[in-house]
Image: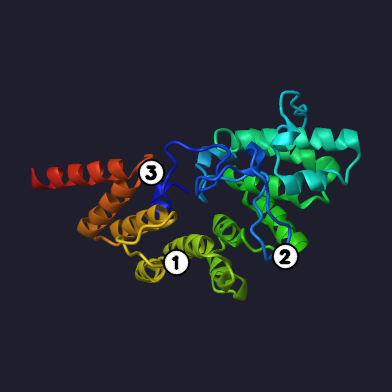
Amino acid sequence: MTANDGRPPRRRGGVGQDRSGRAAPGAGAAGQRRGPAADRQPPVQPATHRRPSPQRRTIGPDPEIASPEDSDPSLLADDVRAELRTLSADNAERVGRHLVAAGLLLEEDPVRALSHAQAARRTAARLPAVREAVGLAAYLSGQWQVALTELRAVRRMTGDSRHLPLLADCERGLGRPDRALVLARSSEAAQLGRAERVELRIVEAGARRDLGQLEAALNVLQDAGLAPEQAAGWSIRLWYAYADTLLAAGRPDEARNWFEAVVGADEDELTDAADRIAALDGETTADGA
């Protein structure tokens, strides 16, 4: 889906960074954990959890993609390199190169990133980091069922529920908003960190919109904690989703106020909130002409 499902489209993006600005392991950061009690980062990570554009779904991954000789496996996170050490030396080198390439391509060319991740999977499917790489690249490529299968595998292998928002959004992409709502209200959801809980609320609101329940969607976003005076790393996405849902509910003046809040906090211009305001102003002018 595009911007009208409440998710801010990326304008410029930190390839190799997560949405808090930290470098992702594929870009050289050190991973921190394997189990559910710590704060492990995936080998590749999207800057935002946003539905990809529909045109990305028309081209499939390349099954014959070569191992990139210019990719340096030493850039991978410590915990990912530890997983690679369970492979033969030659295989570890090849898989590591594909993972690095996937991380670097994820934002700008997720389909090619998926090709690299799947190439790694062919000889290292038992590694959680590899399955995670495939799941994230598939998600950003709009391949919902592949992403759902792989990210479920990661959750099963690691006990980590941090990708629950993506799992729920994949259910939406597959036309199953009811299943997305079940995940959003599961016991696992209550155990997520603050940022992941907010992200899941955005997905939940989108599922409500899928079902035509706009007021319920607004309530979900309000309950997530809008508070413009208490901006956090996830606030821009939440405010944008709220503004977009207000607009869908026929409340353009309120929507404009929240788009303005996004513009005020979005110093890196990661969203198109300014364009949305300009469009609203243009519509107002046209109506008054």
Q: Nearer the viewer, mark 2 or mark 1?
A: 2
Q: Secondary structure at mark 2?
A: loop
Spatial separation of the CA atoms under disc 3 and disc 1: 23 Å
Which residue does the numbered mark 2 point to in the structure image? 159
Q: Please state which of the two labelled residues, at mark 3 or mark 1, is closer to the viewer.
A: 3
For the residue carrying disc 3, how many other residues have a C-alpha within 10 Å: few (<14), some (14-19), or many (20+)? many
Closest to the observer: 235 or 183? 235
In the displayed orientation, state which residue is furthest to the bottom. 187
| Horizontal arrangement in the rendering, residue 61 relative to residue 241 (left or right) | right
**Amino acid type, callout 3:** Thr
- Residue on which disc 3 sits: 271
Secondary structure under the numbered disc 1 in the rendered image: helix
User: In the image shown, does 132 or 138 lie closer to the viewer?
Assistant: 132
Q: Quick check: 207 left or right of 258? A: right
Which is in the foreground here, disc 2 or disc 3? Answer: 2
Q: Earlier in the sequence, mark 2 or mark 1?
A: 2
Residue 228: percent from left, percent from top: 30, 60
User: Real-space Cα distance between discs 2 and 1?
Assistant: 28 Å
State the separation of the CA atoms marked 2 and 3. Answer: 33 Å
Give the residue pinned by disc 1. 208
Mark 1 is surrounded, within 10 Å at the Cα level, by few (under 14), some (14 to 19) or many (20 or more) other residues, namely: many
Q: Secondary structure at mark 3?
A: loop
For this orientation, the residue located farthest to the top is 70
User: Mark 2 packing: few (<14 Cα in 10 Å), some, or many (20+)?
Assistant: few
Q: Label 1 near label 3: C-beta < 8 Å?
A: no
- Tag 2 and tag 1, C-beta contact below 8 Å: no
